[in-house]
Image (tube, rainbow, N blue to C red):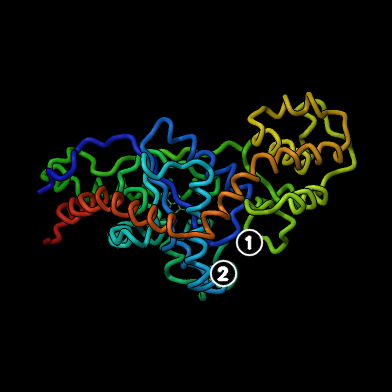
Amino acid sequence: MTDEISAAIAPRVFSGVQPTGNLHLGNYLGAILRFVEMQKTHDCIYCVVDLHAITQPVSVWGGPKELARNIHEVTAAFLAAGIDPVKHVVFNQSRVHQHAELAWVFNCIARLGWMNRMTQFKEKAGKDRENASLGLYAYPSLMAADILLYRATHVPVGEDQKQHLELTRDIAQKFNNDFAESIAEHGFGDAFFPMTEPLIQGPATRVMSLRDGTKKMSKSDPSDLSRINLTDDRDTVAQKLRKAKTDPEPLPSEVEGLAGRPEAENLVGIYAALSGRTAADVLAEFGGGQFSGFKSALTDLAVDKLGPVGSEMKRLVADPGHIDTVLREGAERASAIAAPVMNAVKDIVGFLR
Ligand code: TRP
């Protein structure tokens, strides 16, 4: 019955990006570039999490046409950045029904007390909590299902997702405990789900708003000047960096001099991440100079690195036939992994199938 999958858990990476519009430099440096990097060492599954996108009000995710367009756009960003959909798996979440199915089982494993501690729910629900969707509340349980449906061992995510990864481990642990006997009976030893490790990005690649160095660069910031979108053209990038907030001092020559200067730290961090150099190295070159010169060097670098990604994304989105094929085939391959895991979960829980 359960010989469809092996009891042993192989290393596997899973991560997801929501198709909610405006992919920016923060998504690129903080997530997508790391996804690209992980391909060298792991089997990777990268998912456009469209079920998560609709947890917020329709006015936020933009409605049916926007959603379809944004699914294409995130996929295009994956491909343009260098994610290989043949060696690895790229698909959209709603095509693999087991995500929703496993999420239901997890809704019955997770405790209200655990969910009530989720800080992202509190932030997203805001003051009018009564009006938040039930889906937004269950969001972390669906995210746990995304990860554990593939029994993924590693998840590259930003700092803001750390709590959701902890919850994923709590859910895995409770499932393993609650069904310990059944798990053993079905030949899975003493644990069916792995304790997934988060691979949290360091603060060095945490990209902050260009208008306020203490806030994360975000697609929901009302000011477009706060972020560099992957599809911005040269003039727009130049203008946004020119207007980026700074302080009146010249750049310091050493990293210690960035303390208490969040905007300077952010711009230097962006330069370092885009050039693959350390902040110390960047300051050795630009320290003592004015921001204006540094900003124009940063503009050249950003356009040089992001320009090809942005134009490839535009090319792919303009002719979505290729993207649709990638997603459809990706979903088939994802299903081939997910279906036996979901079947095993059904057997373990005692559902008849
Ligand atoms: N919650 C994640 C974010 O907003 C997106 C996400 C959904 C995800 N499912 C996931 C990330 C599974 C990693 C693994 O960034």
Mark 1 secondary-structure assignment: loop
Left/right of residue 100 with respect to residue 199 in the rendered view: left
Other-residue count near label 1 (Cα within 10 Å), few / some / many at <14 / 14–19 / ≥20: few
Indicate whether 236 appears above or below 252.
below
Left/right of residue 54 with respect to residue 237 in the rendered view: left
Left/right of residue 146 with respect to residue 225 in the rendered view: left
The residue under the point 49% across, 57% down is 18
Q: Quadrant of the C terminus?
A: bottom left
Relative image position of residue 168 (x, y in whole percent): 38, 49
Relative image position of residue 44 (x, y in whole percent): 38, 40
Relative image position of residue 218 (x, y in whole percent): 63, 55
Quick one: label 2 or label 1, which is nearer the N terminus?
A: 2
Relative image position of residue 161 (x, y in whole percent): 50, 49
The residue under the point 48% across, 47% down is 79
Other-residue count near label 2 (Cα within 10 Å), few / some / many at <14 / 14–19 / ≥20: few
Identified by mark 1, the residue type is Ser
Res 206 quadrant in image = top right
Q: Disc 2 versus disc 1: distance between alpha carbons?
A: 9 Å
Mark 2 secondary-structure assignment: helix
Task: Name the residue beneath numbered marker 1.
Answer: 220
Task: Name the residue beneath numbered marker 2.
Answer: 60
Indicate whether 85 appears above or below 124.
above
Residue closest to the far bottom:
131
The residue under the point 81% across, 29% down is 286
- Tell whether label 1 touches label 2 (CB within 8 Å): yes
Q: Nearer the viewer, residue 85 or 201?
A: 85
Left/right of residue 174 with respect to residue 250 in the rendered view: left
Indicate whether 242 appears above or below 276.
below
Q: Nearer the viewer, residue 219 or 229?
A: 229
Identified by mark 2, the residue type is Val
Cβ at disc 1 under 8 Å from ligand 1: no
